[in-house]
């Protein structure tokens, strides 16, 4: 049980119309009431708003405020919460905060309000992650994904899988520990195997769909590659609609990777303009080429830029081979120059110089990533890298169960890996209680009778 009371400024630092200071804890209402001149906050109803003043210990007015009272457990932290809306000046906010700290209130640590909400059972870890995702959402679709997490819909995916696992584990445990219980289903590999296969298939589908959701949330790492002076930086500038990268006629102008974000059809692309990949004796350029290769290895989408006005060079051929296993779009640039010397069936033809064909490229990117068919019903999947990794670990544990079944191992051996999978999924939502298994045993099989 957390007993102390905390406070912090909940709005961004700086001058504005208003600022909000949040206070949470068992004595939040009493402590704020000691600073407040107006109604007696200890006697007001929950979820009400009150006008008054924050005053110093000498009863001098510090600021005119509105105070919102939210009594636990019906608050964000499940504790008593007071939110004070002050004028938005830097000095006045600081003075109000200092006055609160003169009471038995301490300054909150970063994220402590959300941490208390989790510890008090108000939210699970998926919801906690989703709160930050709402704040940091880079596009409209990412915001929709985050809101599903806040609304517990994403957590429901994990709870459903855990419930199915728990049912199998509980039945096995009853067979082992309570063989005299006649009504219990006798678990055998013929019963366990199809249940585990069903779970594995569900997890496989979840992982496939979660990859797309993660791309929506985090942005798609998109690397622009090509030999020097092929127009990579010009393409970056056109996609961004700003002159972010330096463009000259001198080959090798870009010596390092350049990062930028662009919103494309509701999807965020994390664009990376790379140094031209070629063999060079220039020490600085060599470093840039190595960074380009590293970025290429980590890319989720590659825009391979070729000069369509010239024949393919050895460097072009190497890049075509280097990127053939990647999710790739071939971009034939310099369509404004002389007749094309090269062509590809699936290429997009553009002129970065004249800003032609960029819209066609944007459409090709969305289609290549299969994001043109995304709708609201597709969003409720895992999008957090930690969550996805835990699901992968749970799948490994289930694969071990299937191996044990194929090797004719005893049924009680299955429970070890099944419990591991159950715990891995529990780590996603922040639940790893052995008591859950006991609760399941007693509720389903009436073992207390």
Image (cartoon, grey):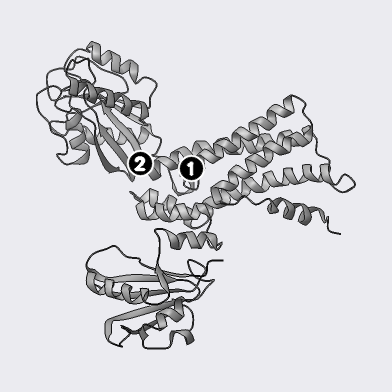
Which residue in the rendered view is the most extreme toward the left?
A: 249
Asked if one can make out residue 92 in the rendered structure from this viewpoint, the answer is: yes
* Image position, residue 164 (x, y; %): 68, 45
Question: Under tag 2, what secondary structure?
Answer: loop
Horizontal and vertical percent for residue 274? 24, 28
Q: Position of residue 236 (x, y in %)?
A: 21, 34
Mark 2, other Cα within 10 Å: few <14 / some 14–19 / many ≥20: many
Q: Is residue 29 above or below residue 312?
A: below
Where 44 sits versus 276, above or below? below
Relative to 55, is 187 above or below?
Answer: above
Say how many tags the image has.
2
Which dot marks residue 386? 1
Which residue corresponds to mark 2?
219
Q: Secondary structure at mark 1?
A: helix
Q: Nearer the viewer, mark 2 or mark 1?
A: 1
Q: Identify the image quadrant of residue 13.
A: bottom left
Q: Quadrant of the N terminus?
A: bottom right
Image quadrant in which the C terminus is located: bottom right
Question: Can I make out residue 185 in this image?
Answer: no
């Amino acid at each position: 049980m957390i007993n102390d009371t905390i406070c912090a400024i909940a709005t961004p630092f700086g001058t504005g119309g208003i600022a909000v200071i949040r206070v949470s804890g068992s004595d939040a209402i009493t402590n704020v009431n000691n600073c407040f001149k107006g109604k007696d906050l200890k006697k007001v109803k929950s979820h009400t708003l009150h006008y008054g003043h924050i005053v110093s210990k000498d009863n001098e007015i510090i600021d005119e405020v509105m105070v919102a009272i939210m009594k636990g457990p019906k608050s964000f932290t499940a504790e008593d919460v007071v939110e004070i809306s002050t004028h938005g000046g830097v000095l006045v906010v600081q003075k109000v905060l200092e006055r609160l700290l003169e009471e038995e209130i301490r300054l909150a640590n970063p994220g402590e309000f959300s941490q208390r909400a989790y510890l008090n059972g108000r939210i699970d870890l998926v919801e906690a992650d989703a709160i930050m995702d709402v704040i940091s959402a880079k596009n409209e679709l990412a915001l929709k994904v985050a809101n599903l997490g806040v609304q517990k819909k994403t957590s429901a995916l994990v709870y459903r899988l855990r419930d199915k696992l728990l049912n199998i584990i509980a039945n096995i445990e009853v067979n082992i520990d309570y063989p005299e219980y006649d009504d219990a289903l006798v678990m055998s590999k013929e019963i366990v195997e199809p249940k585990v296969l069903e779970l594995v298939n569900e997890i496989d589908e979840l992982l496939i769909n979660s990859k797309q959701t993660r791309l929506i949330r985090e942005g798609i790492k998109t690397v622009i590659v090509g030999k020097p002076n092929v127009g990579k930086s010009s393409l970056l500038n056109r996609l961004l609609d700003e002159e972010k990268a330096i463009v000259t006629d001198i080959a090798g102008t870009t010596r390092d990777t350049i990062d930028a974000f662009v919103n494309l059809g509701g999807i965020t692309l994390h664009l990376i303009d790379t140094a031209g990949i070629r063999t060079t004796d220039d020490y600085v350029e060599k470093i840039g080429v190595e960074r380009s290769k590293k970025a290429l290895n980590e890319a989720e989408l590659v825009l391979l830029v070729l000069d369509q006005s010239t024949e393919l060079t050895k460097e072009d051929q190497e890049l075509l081979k280097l990127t053939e296993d990647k999710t790739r779009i071939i971009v034939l640039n310099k369509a404004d120059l002389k007749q094309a010397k090269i062509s590809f069936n699936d290429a997009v033809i553009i002129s970065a110089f004249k800003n032609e064909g960029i819209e066609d490229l944007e459409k090709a990117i969305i289609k290549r990533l299969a994001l043109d068919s995304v709708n609201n019903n597709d969003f409720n999947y895992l999008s957090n890298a930690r969550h996805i990794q835990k699901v992968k670990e749970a799948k490994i544990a289930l694969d071990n169960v299937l191996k044990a079944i194929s090797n004719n191992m005893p049924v009680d051996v299955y429970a070890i890996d099944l419990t591991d999978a159950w715990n891995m999924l529990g780590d996603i939502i922040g639940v790893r209680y052995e008591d859950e298994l006991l609760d399941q045993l007693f509720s389903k099989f009436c073992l207390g009778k």
